[in-house]
Amino acid sequence: MAHSYHHALSSVRQWGGTVDEFLPVHNFFDESKRISADFRHRALRHHAEGIYLAERIFGVTLTLSTGRVVPVRLIGEQHMREGAIRCTYI
């Protein structure tokens, strides 16, 4: 995944809802691209502590417009997995 939008699309496929509901969480993880625009940006938030910080900021769960409740931890873990897959091909 190269962009937070694509991560958000993946979240929609997995849990439903809309891109706009997931985009703030994925943008949080990728804000570090402002400092380093390559894979090194992952060192700042792409780990367990980054996920805990996301929970503090966004809450433990995200309630979608469909009424489904998704743990922010799962969204963060999805973001990490997709980024790790991409990094193995670099």
Image (cartoon, rainbow, N blue to C red):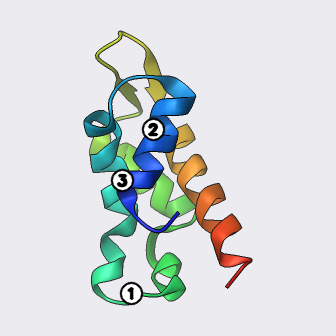
Question: Which circle's residue, 1 or 3, is located before the other in the chain?
Answer: 3
- Front tag of 2 and 3: 3
Residue at image point 40% right, 64% down: 3
Which mark is on residue 29?
none
The picture quadrant where one finds residue 83 is: bottom right
Identify residue type, mark 1. Answer: Ala
Instruction: Check whether the beta carbons of the residues at disc 1 and disc 3 lie within 8 A of each other.
Output: no
Residue at image point 53% right, 83% down: 39
On the image, numbered disc 2 is attached to which residue? 72
Q: Residue furthest right?
A: 88
- Picture coordinates of residue 63, whole percent (x, y): 34, 21
Is 46 placed above or below 17 here? below
Identify residue type, mark 3. Answer: Tyr
Identify residue type, mark 2. Answer: Val
On the image, numbered disc 1 is attached to which residue? 37
On the image, numbered disc 3 is attached to which residue? 5
The picture quadrant where one finds residue 44 is: bottom left
- Front tag of 1 and 3: 3
